[in-house]
Amino acid sequence: MNRTVDVLVVGAGPAGLAAAARLAAAGAGRVEVLERERAAGGVPRHCGHPGFGADRRGRPLDGPAYARRAVRAALRAGAVVRTGVSATGWAGPLTLDVTAPTGLERIRAGAVVLATGTRERPRSARLVPGSRPAGVLTTGELQQTVRMFGPGDERVRERVGRRAVVVGGEPVARHAVRALRGAGVEVAAVVTELPRAAHGFGPVPVLTRTAVTELLGRGRLTGVAVRGRGGGTSVLRCDTVVFTGDWIPDHELARARGLAMAPDTRGPVTDGSYRTVEPGVFAAGNLLRGVEPARVAAAEGRAAADAVLDLLAGRHRPAEGVPVVTEGPLRWVTPGLLDAVAATVLVRPDRHLVRPLLTVTQGGVPLRRERLRGSLAPWRSVRLGPEWTRGMDPAGGPVVIGAEE
Amino acid sequence: MSVTRTGPLPTGREAEYDVVVVGAGVVGCAIARALARHPLRIALVEASSDVGDGTSKANTAILHTGFDAVPGTLEARLVREGHRLLGAFAGEAGIPVEPLGALLVAWDEQQLAALPRLAEKAVRNGHRTTRLLSADELPSREPHLGPGALAALAVPGESVICPWTTTLAYATQAVRSGVDLYLGCRVEKVRTGDPWHRLVTRRGVLRTRHLVNACGLHADAFDALLDRRDFTVTPRRGQLLVFDKFARDLVRHILLPVPGPLGKGVLVSPTVYGNVMLGPTAEDLDDKSATGTTAEGLAGLREQGGRIVPALLDEEVTAVYAGLRAATGQEDYRCAAHPGLRYVTVGGIRSTGLTASLALAEHVLGLLADCGLDPGPERPLAPIRMPNLGEAFPRPYRDAELIARDPEFGMVVCHCERVTRGEIRAAYASAIPPAGPDGLRRRTRARGGRCQGHFCGAEVRALSEEYGKGAR
């Protein structure tokens, strides 16, 4: 079946829903959100911990509550949110092929917003050697398994195991520990190659500067071999290991469309208005680089919606500007292109940096230098307001953002 | 026909067979299927809980022409025949095969010098269509090949195939045609006798007039149960990396290494599932259960793969695994009939076993006849059509008519591999249902993609339990 809509949003997570809500509220016409999962709301649906802002009365929201509100907001605004619908590929510049229980569709849109989110690299992509036993999970799979039954249910322990090791030291590792302990699973240790882990692991031992070198066990996991800071190896006995963090954008549709990808984020390159290099195709949220908090992704979705409205109003502009790149101990920067429109830039450090000196230069000309107060952690991005790139030449060479300690 | 995984084996007349085949890998299943063409009582007995769960599940998935076999060997003949037989069977049964052709790429003078000899060897193996390609011709044939390739030998006819569907198709057709399949049924003792051999397993005792050893890595151990010590199986480990589907556009042919004095090297090959595979390593081990990967092995593969197709290393890795080949210290298969024991050993079946499987089965029928088996008249096998796992052929998620008939085939559960709920349900309702998520992966690809279960793992597991209950 062939259909036409005004805007097609792929992914009903925080970014996609926020984009759809704003577009529908602004009268963009038929705004349709495709969600391949059976429920809309994205990753927050599985995050049973606070940290998703607060409701109107100031009570903290957990992930599921946040997701429900986001879905409600999009629906109230008039967006159509379809679940269990998979976008499987492109049939044209702004046309997607779709599989649903109701059949196949080919949907053409005036604009497409990609908000397909991110996933954690599994054990195989991390090239962790050893046997291939059962009991090897990512946080995503763990959280979904726990959520399927609810904490404390004996079936969770049947499926997940009885004693777990969590790999990773970022806040998401803390969420994994919380999910495991809530389900009655003992957590033997948190293992991270970082010199310092996030706080809040409670009584669970955190082994820093420690790498997992091998998975052991036939049929079921029996332990993980680790190499500690002194170079010595030992075995942590466990029947479950959870690999956390190490995000990679779920960029299948973006790559299938041939969008330019930033090598450091592995997400599609956009300008400050979330336009990709393909006219009418936008990208927002954690698809751009991996995990940022839900409110960051939602704000990007809203900003992308404004750019979509411009396009629909006939004010089409292609993605343009000069490339932005990082140097020094910085992992990535988004957006990948800076044009004359003032934009906020997001930078992620590679490691802990204490009172770093941040620099922005273009063609060797310094635009700004500033020593930050406090320290940066590798699991948090730094937002640099538009003033950081003021004076940049939109027709010049790449803008380079650097850091020194 | 019956398929069981647990519970006691039948007793009395029900436990009496004309032939028992031990080992349900690709070779054992092919033998059982060949025997099923005759009015015989046949059982296929397997220690593992699934068919194709040993060497057969972790090979390089290539349907070889046999161009580089040692001329005159049993292996050379059976690979050549098997290539033809399996190619035809794949078409009937719906096993995905892609005839991409192979390129043997020479990277140094020694390898360059070997190419004409390989072309001559191919001719001696009945393969006359190989062609030497100059360095200038390579970029158009294989645009992402690394720098420094001197020349290549093109071998048309080399194909990629789905090894999981192949083994399952043989077993399914055998079972549908009357073979009894006992999984989770390790043979612990064999009491030879006349007219019955008694096979003692943990689940009970089977009696059989004729016995076939298709135990793969454990063929020597099974031989020992009958007091035969003709060879020793030394497991040779091969570690492999499977790259993301986005790597598929980087490779057009099966890129085979040129065998040299420093070993066989690794190959880079597309898979029928739309990925690219790199491997295998070759490590001789003592431990027949050592299917783990090692840091050195993986690093070595990446180094070698990066020279063959440099852009490969920028792509994500989807899966890492290791398989064991059954090396016996002799460059040929070790098939032997023991007429006095009414016993046939099919040993030393190396990586070419998948290709040779159907020809091996015919060969074993001959060896059983040498052991006094009169198979009787032939009859047609039950027709089968396997679910397609190949990316080059129609998959359910793109099948409008199928989804209209059954909306569950429009419900994508595993997003990376686009496996639908309908396929998972069908796998559990099939003649040989999976024993769990790993078996399900080999039947549907569910949970086998880039996220390895991050998105779908919990649901796939829940569906496995829901459908699996009814199936067993």
Image (spheres, coloured by chain):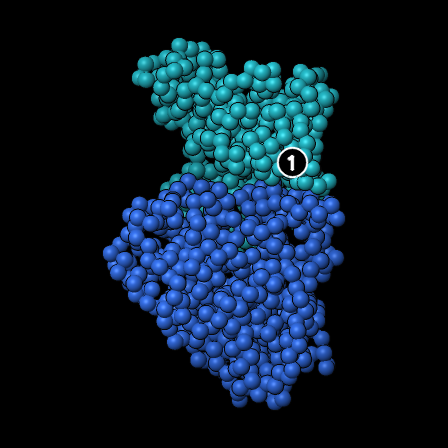
Chain colours: A cyan, B blue
Can you give x and y, in whole percent of width and height, for residue B296 in the image? 37, 51
Residue located at (40% from left, 60% from top): B155
Quadrant housing residue A7: top right
The answer to which of B66 and A299 lies nearer the viewer is: B66
**Disc 1 marks which amino acid?**
Arg
Can you give x and y, in whole percent of width and height, for residue B217 in the image? 48, 69
Residue located at (61% from left, 63% from top): B92
Q: Is residue A391 above or below residue A165?
A: above
Q: Is residue A197 left or right of residue A144?
A: left
Q: Is residue A25 above or below residue B372?
A: above
Quadrant housing residue A326: top left
Q: Which residue is mark 1?
A: A106
Q: Pointer 1 indicates a residue of which chain?
A: A
* Quarter in which the N terminus of chain A is drawn: top right
Regarding residue A166, the answer to whether it shows in the image is yes
Q: Is residue B379 left or right of residue A329?
A: right
* Quarter in which the C terminus of chain A is drawn: top left
The answer to which of B251 and B220 lies nearer the viewer is: B251
